[in-house]
Amino acid sequence: MLARSQAKGDAVSGDKILLTGGAGYIGSHTAVALAEAGYAPVVLDNFSNAKPSVLERLEMILGVPVALERGDILDRAFLADVFTRHEFGAVIHFAARKAVGESVARPMDYFETNCCGLTALLRTMEASGVRNLVFSSSATVYGEPDVFPVPETAPRWHTSPYAMTKLASEDLLLAMADADPFWAFGILRYFNPAGAHESGLIGEEPDGIPNNLMPYLAKVALGELPHLNVFGDDFPTPDGTGVRDFVHVMDLAEAHVSSLRTLLDGSGGHAVNIGTGEGSSVMQMLASYGRACGRDLPWKPGPRRAGDVAKLVADPSLAASVLKFRTRRTLDEMCESSWRWVTRNSR
Ligand code: NAD
Ligand code: UDP
C-alpha cells in the first residue's frame, strides 16, 4: 500500500522519498525496503564511497529502476534543482563520511560533509516545504557507556571527530524541532550494521583492509587475509572478547520504513536505538562466519584496539514502543548473507 505524505504532497509525488547517500551500504538496502513497502526512493549520491553499478543491482532486485540524482549534498544549487524537479514526502539522510580513524586525521573534512551537508539539506528542505527527515545517527553518540543495555537516556558524549559530527547533528535537529513545529525528525542510532541483502547483489564494500569485524572476517573466509586478529581476550565478557549488538542491514533498512511511517502519520519525532538487544562476542561472530563459509576460520589473539569498549548493546525497547519495530534476523543470517555477497562479488 502506498504511504501518504503531509498535506502538501499529492497522490503520487507524496510517496517519493529522497535518500541522500542512497547508493551506499545502508542506503541501498533501505532503497529496497522502501520500494517493497510501496514508496518511490530517489537516490542522491556523489559516489565518493559507492559505485554507480549499485543502481543496476537495485533494478535487478526490484524489477524496476530506481531514480538517481548524481551530485553532492554540499552543492546547494544542485539540491535546489533536485527539490524543484521532485516533490518529496520525506528525506532519509545517509550521506556522510564515516571512518572514525580518518576523522581524527581530517576533522575539517568530517565537519564539512557531515555538518555542513546536513545544514545545506535542511535549508533546501525548508525552502521546499519538506518537513520530515530520518537521520542516520550512531551508537557512537554514547561514547563509552557504562550501562547495559544502553537506553536512549544514557549520557551522550564524543570520543572522535566523527562522533562529534553525529552529536552536533543530533543536537541541531533536536534544537530545530524545539524551535519550530514545522519539523519532524527521526533520529536513528544504529548499533553495528552487518550482513547483506539475501540476493547477494548488494552489500558492504570497504576499500582496502577493513577496520570492522564482519568485512574483515569475509576477507579471511575468502583467503585474502591470513587470519582474524582478535583485539583483546581479557575483557570482562563471558569469553573475554568484545561484545557488540550486530543488527542485520535489512532489519536496519526496515527500521527506516518504520521511522518514516511514524513521521508521515503525524506521530512526531523520535530519537531511538536500532539494535537487537542481544550482544555477540568476537568469538561468537567468528564461529558463525565459519558456519556460513563451511570451515573454521583462523584467528590469533592480540592486544586490545585503542578506545574499544568491552560491550555495546542496545536497549531496543523504545524503538519497539514508538516505531513498532523489532529486528527479526539472526547472527547466522547476517554471516550467511555476507558470505553470499562476497562470494558473488569478490571472485
Ligand atoms: P556508506 O559510505 O556506504 O554510504 C554513504 C554514502 O554517501 C556513499 O554512497 C557516499 O558515496 C555518499 N556520500 C558521501 N558524501 C557525500 C556527499 N557529499 N554528497 C553526496 N553523497 C555523498 O556508509 P553507510 O555505512 O551506508 O552509512 C550511512 C550512514 O549511516 C552514515 O551517515 C553513517 O555515518 C551512518 N552510520 C553507519 C554505520 C556503519 O557501521 N556502517 C554505523 C552507524 C551510523
Ligand atoms: N574486532 C576484532 N578484530 C578486527 C576487527 C574488530 O577483534 O579485525 C573486534 C573489535 O575489537 C570489537 C568488535 O570486533 O570488539 C567489533 O568491532 P567493529 O570495528 O566491527 O565495531 P565497533 O568496535 O566500531 O563497534
Image: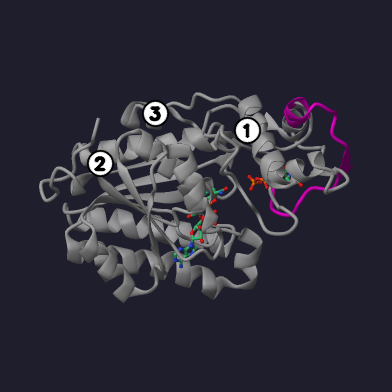
| Other-residue count near label 3 (Cα within 10 Å), few / some / many at <14 / 14–19 / ≥20 | many
* Residue indicated by mark 2: 263
Whole-percent x, y for residue 207 in the image: 68, 59
Distance between the alpha carbons at the discs numbered 1 and 2: 30 Å
Give left or right: position of 315 versus 119. Answer: right
Residue 231 seen in render: no
* Residue indicated by mark 3: 325
Give left or right: position of 77 versus 281. Answer: left
Q: Is residue 252 magenta?
A: no
Q: Which residues are magenta?
A: 288-308
- Circle nearer the viewer, 1 or 3: 1
| Other-residue count near label 2 (Cα within 10 Å), few / some / many at <14 / 14–19 / ≥20 | many
Q: Nearer the viewer, residue 122 or 20?
A: 20
Label whose residue precedes the other's in the sequence (1 or 2): 2
Image quadrant of ligand 2? Answer: top right
Helix, strand or loop at disc 2? helix
Whole-percent x, y for residue 241 in the image: 77, 35
- The quarter holding residue 15 reads top left
* Residue indicated by mark 1: 337
Whole-percent x, y for residue 137 in the image: 45, 50
Q: Is mark 3 within 8 Å of ligand 1?
A: no
- The quarter holding residue 76 reads bottom left
At label 3, the amino acid type is: Phe
Whole-percent x, y for residue 147 in the image: 55, 36
